[in-house]
Amino acid sequence: MTITQVHVRKAALNDATLAEVPLAPLAEGAVRFAVESFSVTANNITYAVVGDGFKYWDFFPAPAGMGIVPMWGHAQVIESRHPDIAVGERVYGYLPMASHLDVRPGKISPGGFLDTTDYRQPMSPVYNSYTRLAADPEHDPAHEAERMIFGPLFRTGFLIEYFLRGENWFGAEQLVVTSASSKTAMGLASVARQQSPGIRRIGLTSKGNVTFVEASGLYDDVIAYDDLERLPVLRSVSVDFAGNADLLARVHRHFEDALAHSALVGVTHIEARSTFGGGEPLPGPKPALFFAPDHAVAFFKAHGAEEGGKLVAAAWREFLAAADGTITIERHKGLGEARAVFLEMLGGKVDPAKGIVIEP
């Protein structure tokens, strides 16, 4: 038996090919997934861009010099050599841009399990966790596409708000986010509206996306990048999802000492990505990288898996209601389509009004 994978050259991300790979017999204690569906978003571009520094290339082995970009999606067990995992069971979690995946379940509970395969252990357990849909408070069969498109990005937004609220927003009056049309930024804005209504939410975006971002209703004000300097200089927190060094510098120079905290999260502007705080010193606070998996571990340690899951699920349902109708879901068949969509997004051709789902 062979499986299909999309191999991306690490040194040249626009070099992506379909590869047929022989599949070994399933090991004792392992289960085999058939990948049913996954989304391709700007988040996946970030995984590829910072893949070596953050070990994103290490989750799914590929030939030397190549990598497999991780995706969030759904899979079904088609073969099992583990007594507690049945054929036919469906899961949600971290999957390769591929047709199949073998995992070795451990720490099994009714709600999920970890992949305990050796090569995945140095990475965060957040990425090694698989949710069993039959006992998942976030699962809604009618919104599986939305979960793949928004879910992991929403969680990052949820954790950013949780962190900032825990720091009393560093004494800020307003939240300023770049790449406001990105799904992570929208998740953050939604949770801030729910949990911190006293904080004014400002979305910065490209001129062409202003109408889309305004229509979401998640921000108190939406400003095109060209008009950044008209923002009132109030004590602010900035969260940078764009990864554009010039834009980040403009934010710092506009607010200077009124900027209470500067968080770096994503890399949506590939052509002008920052070096996460490198280069010339900026006015105001030193930009600090927000690494969501570490914050997720701390959050669930503080609240427990069950209660923490309920808190996330409640905020997720509120976000789903707020985001309803903001995107059009497009479904594409086959890994060739996954490759094509990845390359389009890599080239900056991302329409925030579309959510792409791949069904291998």
Image (cartoon, rainbow, N blue to C red):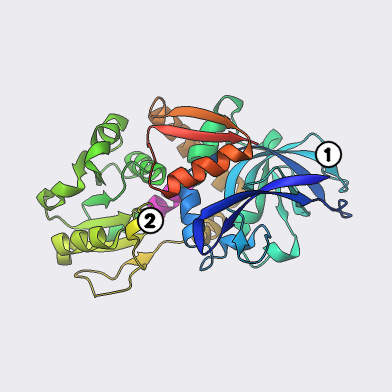
Where disc 2 sits, the SS reads: helix
- Whole-percent x and y of residue 143? 55, 28
Q: Residue at x 59, y 52 (%)?
A: 304
* Boundaries of the magenta span: 155-163
Crowd band around label 1 with a 10 angstrom C-alpha radius: few (<14), some (14–19), many (20+)? some
The answer to whether residue 292 is visible is no
Of the pair 51 and 301, the residue shown nearer to us: 51
**From this viewpoint, which residue is outermost toward the bottom?**
280
Tell which tag, 1 or 2, sits nearer the viewer: 2
Type of secondary structure dominating the magenta stretch: helix
Q: Residue at x 39, y 57 (%)?
A: 265
288 relative to 302 in the view: left or right: left
Give the residue type at disc 1: Ala
61 relative to 175 in the view: left or right: right
Crowd band around label 2 with a 10 angstrom C-alpha radius: few (<14), some (14–19), many (20+)? some
1 relative to 279 in the view: left or right: right
Q: Which residue is mark 2?
A: 270
168 relative to 144 in the view: left or right: left
The answer to whether mark 1 and mark 2 are in CB contact below 8 A is no
Q: How many marks?
A: 2
Of the pair 336 and 89, the residue shown nearer to us: 336
Seen in the picture, residue 167 relative to 43 is either above or below; the reply is below
Give the residue type at disc 2: Ile
Residue 239 lies in the magenta-colored region: no
Q: Which residue is mark 1?
A: 86
